[in-house]
Amino acid sequence: MNRQDVMALQRHRSHPSVSILLPTHRTSPDNKRDPILLKNLLTEATDRLVELLGKRDAAPTIRKLEAQVAAIDLRHTLDGMAIFVSDAHAGVYLLPVPLKPRVVIDDTFATRDLVFAMNRSPRYWVLALSEQPTKLFEGVRDTLVEVRGGGFPLEHTGPGGSQALPDMTDKSKIEAEYHRQFFRRVDQALAAFTKADPLPICVVGVERWLAYYQSVTDHKDIVASVTGNHDKTPPHELGKLVWPAVADALAVRRRRALDALDAAIGAQRFASGLGEAWRRAQEGRGELLLVEQDYHQAARLDEAAGQLHLVAADDPSANMADAVDDLIELVLAKQGDVVFVEDGALEGHGRVTLTLRY
């Protein structure tokens, strides 16, 4: 699931919109509990729909919900699952992070847990270059999920790919140009995803494909590459190969972010603490948000005054369960960047710091 998926779900408005969230398990014996929990949550959702709408009006939604659940293969899951069903939408999403089990029936889908998972997990794109075909994966740690749609997977069907080259002189130069044209198409297809979800990129492929792609790409956030023919490598094996390279690159990125913070402090272009960072982010001035990885904070937002007041998690006045998460979304929505750092790295800055554009 990528940010485009979440944004589409967040725009959805329909009553009733049913969300079923639950943890799942990849291996036995833990995964033997998953069918029981899913069945119990489905029963809860069905009962609540009947109570809310009546048996007749609830029936279409219940049928769609049951069809989605029946199609789930619980032998092949990740760490969490989200099921969303309404009159206009039905989908099941596997997530590499555990979710708390619950059923939500509202006018919108319950996407907060998905947003939290996206913000708090090290995510990246993996572009596996090949002619037959090039694939795109979304990575979270060592878990890869293939993206199908938006042009991917993309196959080289032209001359030099699945079509033979015509007889001509300088055949190798012509073939190289056809390969470059293909990888330009790949780069353009990738751009639609990176524009909506600007994650770091890891590129995988044989040296020849890597060289062609590097010669034509417009992407500046390629942080790692893995050389080799992985056309037939299963995603779970490919994830284990690419994650160490990406993890090293992300560690370098964290160090550079701290260096950028030092420079911003020297230039007096920073805001420390959740409240001040929120105010500057609202103004659209946020360039780079640095957050300690385990920092969570409930808050009360005074919208009239535009001020954020930090409160205890059990304070009834809190209208933000985790204002840190909301701040992350705000900075990203205004084209800023977010980097998580180790706990204690921002101790003198209230655990969160925003460098400013001006």
Image (tube, rainbow, N blue to C red):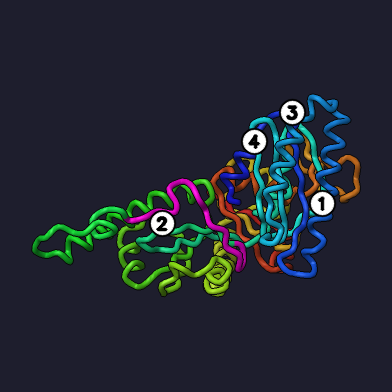
Residue 122 found in image quarter: bottom right
Dot placed on the residue nearer the N-terminal end, 1 or 2: 1
Q: Identify the secondary structure beneath mark 1.
A: loop
Label 4 close to label 3 by CB (< 8 Å): no
60 shown above or below 171? above
Q: Identify the secondary structure beneath mark 3.
A: loop
Q: Name the residue furthest left.
A: 169
Can you identify the residue that label 2 sits on?
219
Q: Can residue 202 be seen in this view?
A: yes
Dot placed on the residue nearer the N-terminal end, 3 or 2: 3
Which class describes the residues within 10 Å of circle 1: few (<14), some (14-19), or many (20+)? some
185 shown above or below 209? above
Query: How many numbered circles does the render carry?
Result: 4
Which x, y percent locates residue 353? 66, 56
Q: Give the range drawn in magenta.
A: 140-156
Dot placed on the residue nearer the N-terminal end, 1 or 3: 3
Query: In the rendered structure, which amino acid carries the disc numbered 2?
Result: His
Dot placed on the residue nearer the N-terminal end, 4 or 3: 3
The label shown at residue 89 is 4
Q: How far apart are marks 4 and 2 (CA)?
A: 33 Å
Can you identify the residue that label 1 sits on?
101
Q: Is residue 280 visible?
A: no
Can you identify the residue that label 3 sits on?
15
Query: In the rendered structure, which amino acid carries the disc numbered 3?
Result: His
* Magenta highlight: main SS: loop
Q: Identify the secondary structure beneath mark 2.
A: loop
Query: In the rendered structure, which amino acid carries the disc numbered 1?
Result: Pro
Q: Give the label, 1 or 4, closer to the camera.
A: 4
Residue drawn at x 70%, y 64% is 346
Q: How far apart are marks 1 and 4 (CA)?
A: 21 Å
Q: Distance between the residues labelled 4 and 3?
A: 11 Å
Q: Identify the secondary structure beneath mark 4.
A: loop
